[in-house]
Image (cartoon, rainbow, N blue to C red):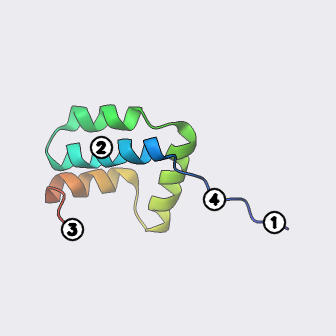
Amino acid sequence: MNAPAPAVIRPLAAVHLRDALTAAANGHGPAALAALMHIDPESWAAIEQRAAALGTGLIDLLATAARTGGTP
């Protein structure tokens, strides 16, 4: 039995995610939301899978970026 191929994050979706995290870190909630809305559904699913593999979710990632100003 073959394992399903991992979902793919398209390059443009990765850019939108980075823009969303940057906007959240800079306190620009509307810009973060706008960037997230540009992510295609397939990439969105892949982002959720990868965040889950890290033991977190996208909302937590955005909240952490906003709380820390983008510093780890």
**Which of marks 2 and 3 precedes in the sequence?**
2
Disc 3 and disc 4 in contact, CB within 8 angstroms = no
**Which of marks 1 and 2 precedes in the sequence?**
1
> Which label sits on residue 2?
1
Distance, label 1 to label 4, CA atoms, is 12 Å
Distance, label 1 to label 3, CA atoms, is 37 Å
> What kind of element bears circle 4?
loop
Query: Which residue is found at the position 73% from the left and 60% from the top?
Result: 4
Quarter of the image where the C terminus is located: bottom left
**Which of marks 3 and 1 precedes in the sequence?**
1
Q: Residues within 10 Å of mark 4 (few under 14, many from 20)?
A: few
Looking at this view, is 56 or 17 the one in front?
17
| Type of the residue with mark 2 | Ala
Which residue in the structure is indicated by mark 4?
Answer: 6
Q: Residues within 10 Å of mark 2 (few under 14, many from 20)?
A: many
| Type of the residue with mark 3 | Pro
Q: Residues within 10 Å of mark 3 (few under 14, many from 20)?
A: few
Disc 2 and disc 1 in contact, CB within 8 angstroms = no
Residue 29 coordinates in the image, percent (x, y) = 21, 37
Distance, label 3 to label 2, CA atoms, is 16 Å
> Which label sits on residue 72?
3
Does residue 16 appear left or right of residue 32 in this picture? Answer: right
Using the image, determine if residue 49 lies above or below residue 24: below
Query: Which residue is found at the position 50% from the left and 67% from the top?
Result: 53
Total marks in image = 4
| Type of the residue with mark 4 | Pro
**Which of marks 4 and 3 precedes in the sequence?**
4
> What kind of element bears circle 3?
loop
Which residue in the structure is indicated by mark 2?
Answer: 20
Residue 51 coordinates in the image, percent (x, y) = 44, 60
